[in-house]
């Protein structure tokens, strides 16, 4: 066939020479001009390089050596695959360091596959380039390669050939060291694997293809690849049908079916189709199953995709190989490459068939993928969220600050409230003044005390209540201390709300701020009038005590001197007289000594009486009841009145301090009563009631004012009350003028460890 | 009165004044067995417990414990000694207090030469004796 083709080509060329003379001439003139221009340009470039290289290196780059490239396509450029190859070759060569003269021709082997058409086209190209030989020929597709290889020796001798987009199954035994290129290797198995990943339930695989030469070639490759899958999948090859039958079959495929589209350039009726733009869309539209493909030009129009060959890549590699040859490499030194496939899928088709993007093979190219809202507006979203977060932080910060301020304000208010509560309930008068010495605050007790309003007390208003005699000293003390920032204490009289002037003790201390600056004074006042009166009363009592002590000493001294001493002197005189005049009669002597003894005994009794008044030995030896009873009898006898003593329930030993206290109260009260009441009859009762000793001294005399009695009856009541309070007891006085008197002393009896007790005799 | 001290009543003396002890010993030594002398209340109690006398001549005014308290304490023990108080207190209250403590005699110190031995004899017979108080006013 090749020989025949060669022969026909030669004849055709000769035959057509005359036919195309005029056209050839015109073309030749045009080419000559071009050639001339390029030669001149080449020479100018060389001259320029030679002359200017040393001093104008920048200009050298703008002059490129010319290389003439002829690309022979198998089909027309209306096929997207061919167009992709063409574009890649032009782009790649355009970037080479050469000025490329680019010629492209097509054998149109799809549209005009018949031998005659091919022969005429071949002759045309031989004729066309006979005198205008290219520097390199790129053959795209198997038909182109076949033609150019056979035309090479005769018409294109010495011209290197680079092929591309030739299916790997092409006869590799072709001769010629001038040929190199890149195989295009379909990989239907990888496409099927990817399809099974995306649609795992697949049971049926329908291979769709046309009856065209290229269609059959791809189909053969697919069939070979699918051989190993036939045991687990059911394969159906719809490759010999007319288009309408095919579409009808595809519209009612069983479930769990996928379609593998090889290529479809011609159906069984001979109708031609462009695979990417005509047959494939028809198949996709008719089929009720996803369509997988093997070529990148088939992806993007509704097919799911697959492991596809790249036509553009074929063109690029061919152009790169051409550049290497231009640079001096020999074709035979450049090994034939094998361009593999890459995964390419259509996102919209995946969505349409409900296939998960995650099941795609790693490194897959995904076309028509609609970006997500996140991908579309990522920066807007990030910016928006950041703004919201920033605003939220800002608002939180402001709210926090406000909450803190409110808390602080609440605390201040609470502190203020607490201060006022404390100040107003304190049992003292509190005042404050500012740095100008003027009063700025007084508490409620102050206002209650003076009976004036707050406005009247502020600033210098408080001075209006100060006693005129104390005003100057008061002001002087205050001002001097204030100027020195020193604490002060002063006593002065202040007019109370009832008009009485009361003594107050005013203490003031300077007040300082946190920064140690002076803030004024704070002070407190207490009414000390009662204390002053008490001090005066105490001083009176002390004086009376001293007086009483002196009186008692005087009395004892008088009794010792005037009575005891006189009697002893008398006894001494009698003894002296007896010694001087001893009676002769023993009887007389006995009588005289008896008399002396009697006098001495009387002195002893008298001393005992004095001693007893100072301190009751009966209380010590015989107990409280006996001592009290004895005292009542003695005083009654001595004063000629009736004293009735009763006692009840005095069982346990009475502590010594209690018994002494009660005995002294009895002595004092009964003596006072006898002295002042004018009564003749007195009742004394001593009893123990619920842990207390109770002494009652009662008379039916003239009575007295109990309050006045504290003063008028001298030491009596005061000393009794003091004694009673020493043993934690109470003294009750019930008396009215004219209504008799009753004095009750109650003393708790709590036996303490180590407390001496006096046993009550007669019952113990 | 028995001259021989063997079988004589055994007497314990209790008074804080040594002079009183001397006078009492002088008065009693011929007819009584003076078994001991105590000079305060506590000594008196200890001596009474250990010596177990027939008679205890007891002063009221003594340190630590007075005579009334000593008599009271001894009454709480099983002391069999007859108690005679020897006191300067010419007061019926003391006499009553003494008898209430179980004493059998109350002798005034100024009258001990005349009253003590009769009081002892009465006490040994289980009878009471009291010195006669001179008439006086308080």
Image: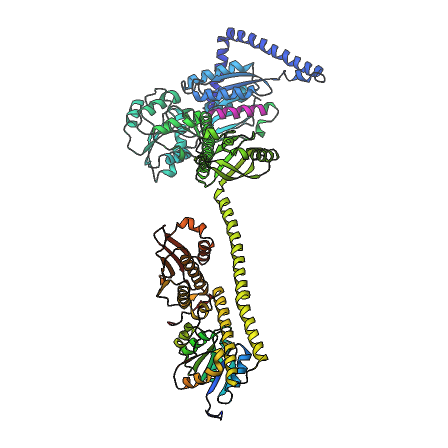
Q: In terms of depth relative to the viewer, which is nearer, A639 or A528?
A: A639
Is residue A325 shown in magenta?
no
Q: Position of residue A140 (x, y in %)?
A: 48, 23
Q: Which residues are magenta?
A: A309-324
Q: In terms of depth relative to the viewer, which is nearer, A355 or A757?
A: A757
Q: Position of residue A576 (x, y in %)?
A: 58, 76
- Residue at x 38%, y 60% (from the top left corner): A695
Please say whether residue A170 is visible from this viewpoint: no
- Residue at x 56%, y 28% (from the top left corner): A177
Q: Position of residue A231 (x, y in %)?
A: 34, 40
Please say whether residue A555 is visible from this viewpoint: yes
In the rendered view, would you say A763 is above or below A531? below
Is residue A320 shown in magenta?
yes
* Quarter of the picture holding the C terminus of chain A: bottom left
Q: Position of residue A250 (x, y in %)?
A: 30, 27
**Would residue A573 appear left or right of A497 to someone viewing this image?**
right
Magenta span: chief secondary structure? helix
In the rendered view, would you say B92 is above or below A277? below
In the rendered view, would you say A198 is above or below A537? above
Query: Quarter-wise, where is residue A79 in the image?
Result: top left
* Color theme of the render: rainbow
Q: Please tell me how many numbered marks the rendered image carries.
A: 0
**Would residue B34 appear left or right of A333 to someone viewing this image?**
left
* Quarter of the picture holding the N terminus of chain A: top left
């Amino acid at each position: 066939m090749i020989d025949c083709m060669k022969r026909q080509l030669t004849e055709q060329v000769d035959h057509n020479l005359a036919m195309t003379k005029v056209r050839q001439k015109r073309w030749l003139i045009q080419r000559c001009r071009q050639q001339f221009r390029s030669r001149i340009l080449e020479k100018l470039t060389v001259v320029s390089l030679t002359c200017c290289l040393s001093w104008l290196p920048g200009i050298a780059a703008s002059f490129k050596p010319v290389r003439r490239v002829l690309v022979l396509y198998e089909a027309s450029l209306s096929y997207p695959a061919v167009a992709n190859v063409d574009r890649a070759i032009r782009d790649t060569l355009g970037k080479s360091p050469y000025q490329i003269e680019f010629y492209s021709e097509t054998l149109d082997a799809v549209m005009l596959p018949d031998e005659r058409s091919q022969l005429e086209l071949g002759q045309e190209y031989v004729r066309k380039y006979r005198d205008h030989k290219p520097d390199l020929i790129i053959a795209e597709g198997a038909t182109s390669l076949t033609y150019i290889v056979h035309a090479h020796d005769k018409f294109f001798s010495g011209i290197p050939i680079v092929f591309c987009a030739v299916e790997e199954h092409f006869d590799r035994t072709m001769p010629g060291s001038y040929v190199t290129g890149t195989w295009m290797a379909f990989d239907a198995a990888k496409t099927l694997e990817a399809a099974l990943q995306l649609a795992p339930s697949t049971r049926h695989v329908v291979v769709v293809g046309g009856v065209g030469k290229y269609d059959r070639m791809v189909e053969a490759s697919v069939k070979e690849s699918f051989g190993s899958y036939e045991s687990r999948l059911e394969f159906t090859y719809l490759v010999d049908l007319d288009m309408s039958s095919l579409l009808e079959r595809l519209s009612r495929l069983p479930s769990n079916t996928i379609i593998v589209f090889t290529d479809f350039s011609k159906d069984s009726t001979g109708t031609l189709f462009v695979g990417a733009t005509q047959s494939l869309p028809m198949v996709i539209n008719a089929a009720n199953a996803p369509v997988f493909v093997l070529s990148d030009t088939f992806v993007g129009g509704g097919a799911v995709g697959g492991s596809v060959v790249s036509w553009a890549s074929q063109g690029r590699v061919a152009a790169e190989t051409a550049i290497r040859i231009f640079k001096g490499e020999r074709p035979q030194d450049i090994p034939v490459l094998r361009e593999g496939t890459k995964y390419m899928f259509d996102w919209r088709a995946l969505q349409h068939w409900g296939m998960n993007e995650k099941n795609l093979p790693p490194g897959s190219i995904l076309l028509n993928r609609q970006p997500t809202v996140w991908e579309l507006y990522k920066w807007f979203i990030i910016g928006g969220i950041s703004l919201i977060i920033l605003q939220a932080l800002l608002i939180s910060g402001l709210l926090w600050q406000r909450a803190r301020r409110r808390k602080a304000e609440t605390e201040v208010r609470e502190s203020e409230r607490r201060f006022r509560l404390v100040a107003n309930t304190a049992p003292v008068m509190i005042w404050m003044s500012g740095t100008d010495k003027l009063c700025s605050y007084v508490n409620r007790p102050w206002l209650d005390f003076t009976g004036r309003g707050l406005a009247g007390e502020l600033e210098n208003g408080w001075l209006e209540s100060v006693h005129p005699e104390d005003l100057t000293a008061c002001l002087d003390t205050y001002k001097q201390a204030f100027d020195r920032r020193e604490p002060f204490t002063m006593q002065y009289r202040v007019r109370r709300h009832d008009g009485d002037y009361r003594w107050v003790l005013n203490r003031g201390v300077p007040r300082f701020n946190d920064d140690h600056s002076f803030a004024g004074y704070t002070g407190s006042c207490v009414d000390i009038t009662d204390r002053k009166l008490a001090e005066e009363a105490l001083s009176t009592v002390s004086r009376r005590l001293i007086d009483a002590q002196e009186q008692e000493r005087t009395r004892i001294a008088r009794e010792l001197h005037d009575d005891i001493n006189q009697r002893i002197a008398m006894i001494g005189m009698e003894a002296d007289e007896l010694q001087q005049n001893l009676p002769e009669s023993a009887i007389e002597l006995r009588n005289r000594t008896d008399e002396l003894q009697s006098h001495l005994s009387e002195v002893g009794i008298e001393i005992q009486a004095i001693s007893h008044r100072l301190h009751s030995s009966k209380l010590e030896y015989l107990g409280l009841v006996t001592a009290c009873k004895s005292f009542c009898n003695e005083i009654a006898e001595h004063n000629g009145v009736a004293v009735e003593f009763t006692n009840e329930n005095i069982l346990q030993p009475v502590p010594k301090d209690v018994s002494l206290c009660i005995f002294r109260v009895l002595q004092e009260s009964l003596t006072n009563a006898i002295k002042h009441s004018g009564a003749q009859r007195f009742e004394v009762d001593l009893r123990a009631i619920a842990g207390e000793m109770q002494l009652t001294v009662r008379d039916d005399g003239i009575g007295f004012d109990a309050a006045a009695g504290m003063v008028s009856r001298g030491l009596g009541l005061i000393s009794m009350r003091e004694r009673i309070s020493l043993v934690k007891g109470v003294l009750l006085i019930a008396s009215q003028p004219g209504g008799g008197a009753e004095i009750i002393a109650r003393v708790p009896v709590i036996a303490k460890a180590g407390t001496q007790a006096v046993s009550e005799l007669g019952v113990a | 009165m028995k001259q021989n001290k063997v079988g004589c009543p055994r007497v314990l003396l209790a008074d804080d004044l040594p002079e009183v002890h001397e006078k009492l010993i002088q008065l009693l030594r011929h007819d009584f067995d003076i078994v001991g002398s105590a000079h305060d209340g506590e000594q008196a109690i200890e001596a009474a417990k250990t010596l177990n006398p027939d008679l205890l001549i007891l002063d009221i005014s003594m340190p630590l414990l007075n005579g009334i308290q000593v008599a009271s304490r001894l009454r709480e023990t099983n002391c069999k000694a007859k108690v005679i108080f020897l006191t300067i207190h010419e007061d019926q209250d003391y006499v009553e207090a003494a008898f209430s403590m179980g004493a059998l005699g109350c002798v005034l110190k100024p009258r001990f030469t005349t009253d003590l031995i009769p009081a002892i004899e009465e006490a040994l017979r289980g009878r009471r004796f009291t010195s006669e108080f001179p008439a006086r006013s308080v």
